Amino acid sequence: MLNKSNAIFLGLFFLITGCAKQWADSEIKPERLPKLKQKDFILKLDSIKSIAPLYMYSKLKINYKDTERNVSFKTTLKSVKDSAVSVLVTFARIPVFGALIDTSHLTILNKKDNCYTKGLINELSKTSGINFKYENIEELIFGHPIGYESDQKYHMLNDHFHYILSNHRKGQGRKKKEIVYSYSLHRDQNHLASTSIWVPADSVQIEAVYSEWQFSENKYLPKKIELNIQSPKFSAQIKIEYTKLDTTTPESLFLIIPEKYEKCD
C-alpha cells in the first residue's frame, strides 16, 4: 500500500493520460499552417521518438498545484536510456524523496518518514490506480510522443492551425475502454507542441504541453513542460522547468535503502 505522500510523488511522474485544446481563447488568430501529409507526420513522430541522449543529468524546478495544495520544490533527475531513471526531490534544500525506476521495478525512499516502497511497476501501478510503464517516463522527459506505436493506425485531424495526429478520428474513442492518444506537432515540425490522452472509461483528461525547448548535443529536449490533469474528482497542474542539463557525462544510477528504514504503510 502507498501512503498519501508517496501517492502524490507517483502522481507527479506517472499520471500521464488526457486530452485538451492547445490554443487558449485569444483575440489574435494564429496563422494557417502549411499542409503536412499524414505519412510525413508519422515519419516525423518516428524520428522524434528515435532521438534521445544515452545519458542525461538535469536539475528541475517543479511547481505542483491542485485544489488542496500549491507547492514548489527542486529535483535532480538522472537517466540511462532504456535502463533506469533516478530522482531526488528536495524541499527547502532538504532531501525528502528518492526514487529509482528501471524497466520493471520502482523503489521510493521517503526520507521524511524513514520508510520505503519497492515493487514491480505493474503491481504498484494497480495499487496506486495509475497505469504507467517505464517507457512512459522516458517519453515524458525526452519530449517523445507518449504511448506512440509505429504500427498503430492513426488519423490526421482536420485543423488548419495545428498539426494533430490521433489514434481516433475527431479525437474521441469509439469504445469507452479505449484510450485516445493525440499528438500536436510544433509549427516548425522539429518537435512536439503537446501530447494528449483521453480515458473515456474514467473521464480522465491529461495533457503534456511542451512550452519551451532546448538544443543539446544536436538533440531537441524539453526546457519547460506543463501537465494538466482533469478527472471528475481531481484536477492538478504540474509545471516542470529544466534549469540545468548535461547529456554527455556517463551516469551510474543506484539507490540504497538504509537498514533502519521500514516499508511504508
Image (spheres, rainbow, N blue to C red):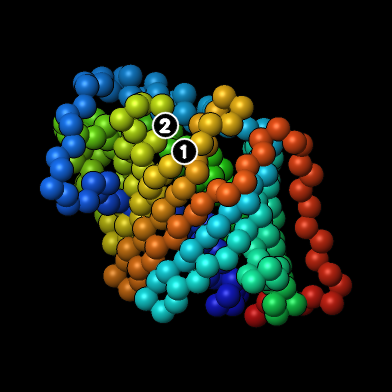
Q: Nearer the viewer, residue 240 or 99?
A: 240
Query: Tag 1: Cα neighbours inside 10 Å, few (<14), some, or many (≥20)?
Result: some
Relative horizontal placement of residue 166, taking residue 76 as reference (left or right): left
Q: Position of residue 44 (x, y in %)?
A: 40, 24
Q: Quadrant of residue 162?
A: top left
Query: Given the image, on which type of amino acid does mark 2 rest?
Result: His
Q: At 42% across and 69% down in the image, what residue appears? A: 65
Which residue is found at the position 18% from the left and 41% from the top? 170
Q: What is the quadrant of residue 69 in the picture?
A: bottom left
Using the rendered image of the protein, determine whether residue 32 is visible from the camera's viewpoint. yes
- Tell me the kind of residue under disc 1: Trp
Above-or-below relation of 45 to 213: above
- Which residue matches tag 1? 213
Give the foreground label among 1 and 2: 1
Residue lying farthest right?
A: 259
Which residue is at a point 42% across and 31% down the rendered structure image? 191
| Residue under the image location 80 percent in, 66 percent down | 257
The image position of residue 210, as x and y in percent, is 41, 44
Of 110 and 190, nearer the camera is 190
Name the quarter where the N terminus is drawn: bottom right
Q: Please indicate, yes or no, whether residue 139 appears anywhere in the rendered image.
A: no
Residue 94 in the image, given as x and y percentages of width and height: 70, 71
In the structure shown, which secondary structural element does the residue marked by tag 2 occupy? loop
Give the label on residue 191, or none: 2
Q: Quarter-wise, where is residue 108 in the image?
A: bottom right
Give the quadrant of the C terminus: bottom right
In depth, the one of 223 and 129 nearer the eye is 223
Mark toward the start of the polypeptide (1 vs 2): 2
| SS for callout 1 | strand
Q: CB under 8 Å between callouts 1 and 2?
A: yes
Q: Give the tally of numbered discs.
A: 2
Image position of 35 with respect to 13: above or below? above
